[in-house]
Image (cartoon, rainbow, N blue to C red):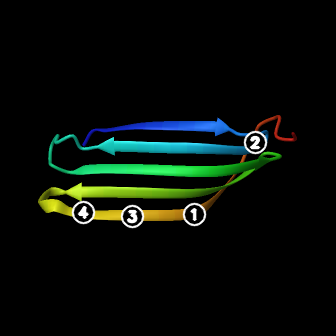
Amino acid sequence: MPIIGLNTLWNLTEHWNFSLTGDYGGFGVDSNEQTWKVEAMVGYRWRGWGVGWSAQWTTRIAPGSMRYTIRHVFLVSRSSTRADSNR
């Protein structure tokens, strides 16, 4: 199933950022399935560490009009090993 998507990240301040990701797929190729997803995330970076709150909405439409939607909200953390992580 072919899928196209878009991902963007905005640095709001030195520490805060916002990202938005979305995709859509299906287009009637191989089957009648369609899928779409949107994810928004607000993040905070400090000294090489980052935390973010993410919300995700996913819908998949399968042949025979079976449809299901999944919604997630979760906390994400990460660390960086960059040389300038002491800022």
Q: Dot 4 corresponds to which residue?
A: 67
Q: Mark 1 near mark 2, Cβ–Cβ under 8 Å? A: no
Residue at label 1? 74
11 left or right, relative to 23: right
Q: Nearer the viewer, residue 84 or 19?
A: 19
Query: Which callout, 2 or 4, points at the residue further toward the start of the chain?
Result: 4
Marks 1 & 3, CB-CB < 8 Å contact: no
The amino acid pointed to by label 4 is: Arg
Residues at discs 2 and 4 in contact (Cβ within 8 Å): no
> What percent of the width, then of the height, locates residue 38?
44, 50
Q: Nearer the viewer, mark 3 or mark 2?
A: 3
Residue 23 x %, y %: 39, 43
Q: Position of residue 80 (x, y in %)?
A: 73, 44
**Is 18 displayed left or right of 84 in the figure?**
left
Residue at 49% across, 43% down: 21
- Look at 44% across and 64% down and name the residue there: 71
- In what quadrant of the picture does the C terminus appear? top right
Q: Which residue is mark 3?
A: 70
| Spatial separation of the CA atoms under disc 3 and disc 2 | 33 Å
In this rendering, which labeled residue sits more in front, label 1 or label 2? 1
Mark 1 or 4: in front is 4
Query: Which circle, 2 or 4, is nearer the viewer?
Result: 4
List the single residue furthest toward the left. 64
Amino acid type at mark 3: Ile
Location of residue 63 by image quarter: bottom left
Q: CA distance from mark 1 to mark 3?
A: 13 Å
